[in-house]
Image (tube, grey):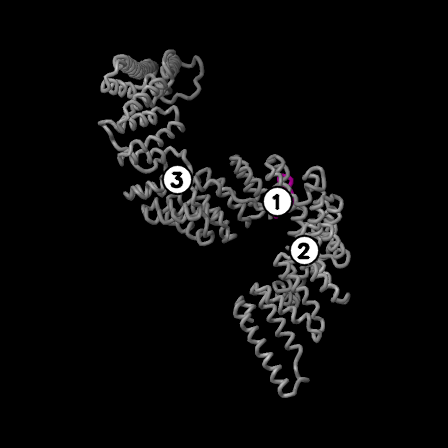
Amino acid sequence: MAQSIGALQLALEKAKEAGRKERALVRQREQSGNTDHINLDLTYSVLLNLANQYANNEMYPEALNSYQVIVKNKMFSNAGRLKVNMANIYFKQKNYPKAIKFYRMALDQISNTHKEMRIKIMQNIGVVFVRTGQYSDAITSFEHIMSESPNIRTGFNLILCYYAIGDRERMKKAFQKLISVPLGIDDEDKYIPTNDDTTSNMVIEAIKNDKLHQMERDLKVLAEKYIMTAAKLIAPAIETSFAAGFDWCVDMVKSSQYVELANDLEINKAITYLRQKDFNQAVETLKTFEKKDSRVKSAAATNLSFLYFLEKDYDQADRYADLAMNADRYNPAALINKGNTVFVKQDYEKAAEFYKEALRNDSSCTEALYNLGLTYKRLNRLGEALDCFLKLHAILRNSAQVMYQLAHLYELLEDPQQAIEWLMQVISVTPTDPQALAKLGELHDGEGDKSQAFQYYYESFRYFPSNIDVIEWLGAYYIETQFCEKAIQYFERATLIQPTQVKWQLMVASCYRRSGNYQKALETYKDIHRKFPENVECLRFLVRLCTDMGLKEVQDYATKLKKVEKMKEIREQRVKSGREGSARGRREGREGSAGSADDVKAESKQLSPVLDSGRDSGHSSSSSSIKGERLSAKMRSLPGSNEPYETSSPKELDASYVDPLGPQMERPKTGAKRRVEDDDFADADLGDDLLPE
């Protein structure tokens, strides 16, 4: 009884106590001269129970000694079969030669009348041979069993052995034997009421879910699992291509008692195509199910919807999600895929309804619960989103994605302490996630804890040294703490990541200048000038440095600075005059249109995108002036033939950059600039997993 509730230590103590009492009883009877009344069956039971409890507690040497006492006692008949238990212990200890020896000794001591027992021992011998890699010996054992008393487990093991030695023909024969093994269970029709007989219907209702029927169902599920696994295993090996092998397996299954498995095998064939990244073949295979029965059609359409969703073909994904729902409205995967297609169209209310329906059909559907949480977050219903993810966390305790979403929700709810706690849980599960570490740094920075923020930003940089926001924060931190030389390595890395952004190179030069290394600063500014000859800030600092250091080049750089500033001024005037010209052109166009008849005035107010030629002079003049404006604007936006491309860039980094280390220094905002969005974690989970069954 103690063993049955899992109290193995208590069971062992009780077994030992029983042994002590049994020995005391034997002594008492010997002393009183009642040796004829000694109960050998009781002694056998006590010793066997003790040995079993030792084995259950993994005290294998003691268990073997106890079994040995029983086996060597000639007074116990049929004790030889306990050598099976001893062999099992040797098997657990991976002492395979001794296990085979004891199994064979047990087999010799069991008569042919105990056929089932002998079959089970031979099955164990075959399994040990598989573990030792002696496949030919294992095949001999399994073949004998399949000829004497075939069963599903042995048939599957035989296929594995043939696969290991690469025997195609025998794999096929073994598969045919496997699907012809009789299960010895009643047909499901037995449990369907057939008439109005109340008594028989009550009996059927009573036995419909009894333990015998549950055992039959479990046996059938196990058989289907072995057949499916065997088919997937041998399909690529028995023919020249895996598709031909699958087709052979499907044909064999169709002619067997497992005919309903044929469709599941076909779906598995499509999934195998997916694993081989042959998406077209997968789609073609799944499309053949459109005219099959509803269950299979729903499964195939669900997978097709999933595939098209991943390929961002949302119209097709929506179509097949509808097909899957029409075939089986209670298929949660179909409802999730439908919800996903609505989600990407930003109809979040409708998406939430589909996810809720999926949860009503299957309350344990984690994908639906996750996506419902994301939907509520998009709808800004943060409390309901929080409920969803807290429920999900109770189911998926170690899901980093779920914990991250909880952290982000608390951040949106302006509870940074809770957000920090959840992010700490995220990094306990995925300690090398640079984005989570950076987010922790950002939150600590927001709370004013610079040292903790630095620690997390530095860890994030260590794992992913290419996040420009993290690099910028670390550089700014060292500048703020007056360690400019340490900031240099971060800005140099930023220069490698964004070589066309002049500001990082200017920051490097500025750090050298601020730390007193004027020579290195001068060299860096010269290098920047070679790469960006029209950068105003660079030229200004070159002029300042050359003046301070008393260098002759100061005049050259001063001349270049004036020239660049003049060019910049001219460009600004051109842009300004271009804008004025455009405005003037629009006014003239309006005045020209105003001179037309009243009905033309009314019509010109609602110009259609395409104008008929020769319809009205007012219209044509207006349209031509508009076209002229667009063309001139486009021409002006292009760089001149003697200007580098950067100079005409609308942002003009060279003109607007302010050195943060100069007299006009303004500390950049600390904290990573990039907010981690839902999509960082959510996108992968919006698509539901493949659900072939």
**Which residue is pictured at 61% across the width and 44% down the height?**
297
Check whether the beta carbons of the residues at disc 2 and disc 3 lie within 8 A of each other. no
Say the numbered circle drawn on residue 460: 3
Quarter location, residue 654: top left
Q: Nearer the viewer, residue 632 or 671?
A: 671
Q: Nearer the viewer, residue 32 or 119?
A: 32
User: Considering only order in the chain, which callout, 3 or 2, is on the residue closer to the N terminus?
Assistant: 2
- Please say if 318 is above or below 569: below
Determine which residue is flagged by label 2: 128
Q: Nearer the viewer, residue 279 or 465?
A: 465
Determine which residue is flagged by label 1: 297
Membership of 634 in magenta stretch: no
Residue type for callout 3? Ser
Q: Name the secondary structure under disc 3.
A: helix
Horizontal placement of 405 versus 567: left or right?
A: right
Say the numbered circle drawn on residue 37: none
Whole-percent x and y of residue 206? 62, 66
Q: Magenta residues, as a range?
A: 286-299
Q: Which mark lies nearer to you, 3 or 1?
A: 3
User: Considering only order in the chain, which callout, 1 or 3, is on the residue closer to the N terminus?
Assistant: 1
Q: CA distance from mark 3 to mark 1?
A: 47 Å
Q: Name the secondary structure under disc 1.
A: helix
User: Considering only order in the chain, which callout, 2 or 1, is on the residue closer to the N terminus?
Assistant: 2
- Please say if 693 is above or below 548: below
- Please say if 612 is above or below 76: above
Whole-percent x and y of residue 593? 34, 15
Residue type for callout 1? Lys
Q: CA distance from mark 1 to mark 2?
A: 43 Å
* Res 381 seen here: no
Q: CA distance from mark 2 to mark 3?
A: 50 Å
Q: Which mark lies nearer to you, 1 or 2?
A: 2
